[in-house]
Image (cartoon, rainbow, N blue to C red):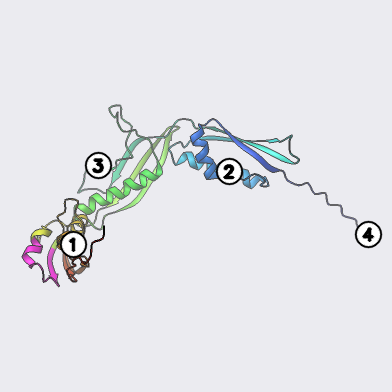
Amino acid sequence: LIFLNITVEERPRLSKFRFKGVRKGTQESLRDDIRLIRGKVITPNLIANTERKVKNYFIDKGFYNTDVEIIEEPDSSLKNSTIVTIKIKRNERIKVKDISIEGNEALSDKKLRRVMKNTKRKKFIRIFKASKFIKSDFELDKKSIIAKYNSKGYRDAKITSDTVYQVSESRVKIELKLKEGKQYYFGNIKWVGNTKYTTEELDRILGIDKGDQFNQDLFDQRIFQDPNGRDISSLYLDDGYLFFQPSVVETEVRGDTIDFEIRLREGKQARINKVTI
């Protein structure tokens, strides 16, 4: 006969946790992120995940070299319970040393860097905008670059690759590679379904002529909602056509020229029936 004795030792449970090295406001934000709950069983996986979440919190804010140390101490007031202390040292925030761009011919490096409102190179003359690198801001800046190309008629423009790597303990370099594609222009723009206003009147409000540089944002503004009120939808809505609906259809692409058909559903003009005060 063989006798097998298995001795089981229960893992400790979390009685409370605290932070050291960061301000109270930051502590509250971290509590929401790591979601540690009193009574939870403490495992190596729990400790590793907590450390990772804390580091990612600071990485998102540009602190890539944050040191995190998690200390476990027995809680003398509770049986088999542990107090967890999370010590944080943010260290210096990562800055952008340089931004290099390849594949751009229509827009210069200087113009594209200017479009990147949140991600700037480290310069002594820069006072009002820090050169910190924050990943979420960088993603927005990449979208701004594409939007800039789109406004210039390059609707196929895309960023083929982006690389961010550290060149020192507190500096990173950004490398962007672009594919601009061809520049497009507006072709024929045809109106369908308009009875209230003539084609000439609608053309005047639209303000876009055949041969103009293609600009999707401007096109959408002039049809749906222009900040200055110069758009087709406002023209109808301001005259009581509350059920007005425009639909834009791209009918043909001829080389670098795009033809459109704007189909209008005017609906009936709404009138006031009853006013209750």
Q: Residues within 10 Å of mark 2 (few under 14, many from 20)?
A: many
Q: Is residue 27 magenta?
A: no
Mark 4 touches mark 3? (CB < 8 Å): no
Q: Amino acid at mark 2?
A: Thr
Q: Residue at x 52, y 45 (%)?
A: 33
Q: Earlier in the sequence, mark 1 or mark 2?
A: 2
Distance between the Cα atoms at labels 4 and 3?
81 Å
Amino acid marked by disc 3:
Asp
Foreground: 100 or 130? 130
Residue type at tag 1: Leu
User: Quadrant where the N terminus lies?
Assistant: bottom right
Q: Residue furthest right?
A: 1
Task: Tell me which label, 4 or 1, sits earlier in the chain.
Answer: 4
Q: CA distance from mark 3 to mark 2?
A: 41 Å
Residue 169 drawn above or below residue 43: above
Tell me if residue 110 comes above or below residue 149 in the rendering.
above
* 198 within the magenta span: yes
Dot 2 corresponds to which residue? 50
2 or 4: mark nearer the eye: 2
Check residue 109 in the rendering and tell me which mark sits there, or answer none. 3
Q: Which image quarter: residue 52? A: top right
Mark 3 and 1 residues: CB-CB less than 8 Å, in contact? no
At 74% across and 39% down in the image, what residue appears? Answer: 78
Q: Earlier in the sequence, mark 2 or mark 4?
A: 4
Give the residues drawn in magenta, as a range: 187-203
Is 262 on the left or on the right of 115, as rendered? left
Q: Residue furthest top?
A: 124
Q: Nearer the viewer, residue 110 or 136?
A: 136
